[in-house]
Amino acid sequence: MKQLKKYKKILNKTVKSIGDCTDHLYKEGWAEASSGNLSIDVSNSIPGKKIKNEQWLLITRSGCRFRETARRPWNDVLLIRTGSKKGIRIEYSGKKNARPTSELPTHKLIHDFYRKKKTRGTAVIHTHPTYIIALTHLKDYRQTDILNRLLVSIHPEIKAFIPEGVGFVPYLPPGSERIAVATQNAIEKHRVIIWEKHGCIAVADDLDRALDLIMIMEKAARIFFIARSAGFDLQELSQQQVDDLTNIKKR
Ligand SMILES: [Zn+2]
């Protein structure tokens, strides 16, 4: 309880943003049962001297249900410290014996990457957008360039939000070190990465911006299936039309 008081003062707003985001993910239908996980690098908010490579992350706990998290976000998060020789230390846990999400390896490697780039305050969302997952079941679109051409052809404004395009990681076991490493490799070029038959990862300065990236990508995938269900194939943009989108800005 002493710890809760200590961190509540400095992290309350951030934890509330986690609750708001989990609520949204659940209502979209992208966080069934206890799926989905979020993390935010809060190193800059924690007072005191830090050792080299140290990072403080707020991260959702394993087994939490996002449909409940909005009501009591402090119960479903952990504050962990990474980067020391002692490994990962739990500084605050909303629930006794709680463990961080099983996708911790991916979150940790992404935050490591951004720390090396000297950017802090990075928010990471992992969720299961229905139509995006469905799209990865189609063999024809399991290639980064083909997938991006499709998404931009369906919803050209995606280029304003994700100009570098989305990354794609072929199927690997959920929660594994292998999926974490493959994601870390993709994160060098992409802020949004689709995991085959599983979901996606989005990284941004805060959770709202990360959510924007997922929403626009999912919208494109949904239009694809609506068109297919109506019995017609979508026509791709020409190379000239794609090139014309290079300087498109967010509205
Ligand atoms: Zn997942």
Image (tube, rainbow, N blue to C red):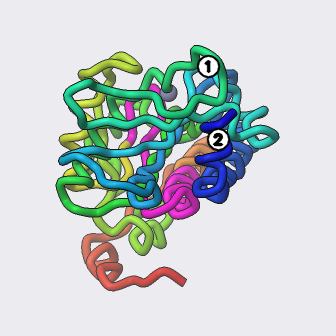
How many other residues sit within 10 Å of disc 2, few (<14), some (14-19) or many (≥20)? few
Residue 251 lies left or right of residue 239; in this view the side is right
Per the image, the residue denoted by label 1 is 63
Per the image, the residue denoted by label 2 is 229
Q: What stretch is highlighted in magenta?
A: 194-219
> Farthest right residue?
71
Q: Which amino acid does label 2 sit on?
A: Ser
Task: Give x and y (percent) for residue 117.
Answer: 19, 59
Residue 207 lies left or right of residue 189; in this view the side is right
Residue 61 vertical position relative to residue 234 in the rendered view, above or below: above
Residue placed most toward the observer, 219 or 211: 211
Q: What's the residue at 39%, 83% (across, down)?
A: 248
Q: Which mark is in front, 1 or 2?
A: 1
Residue placed most toward the observer, 203 or 15: 15
The quadrant where residue 112 appears: top left
Residue 213 in magenta?
yes
Residue 126 in magenta?
no
Q: What residue type is labelled 1?
A: Gly
Task: Give x and y (percent) for residue 181.
Answer: 22, 31
Q: What's the residue at 53%, 48% (across, down)?
A: 221
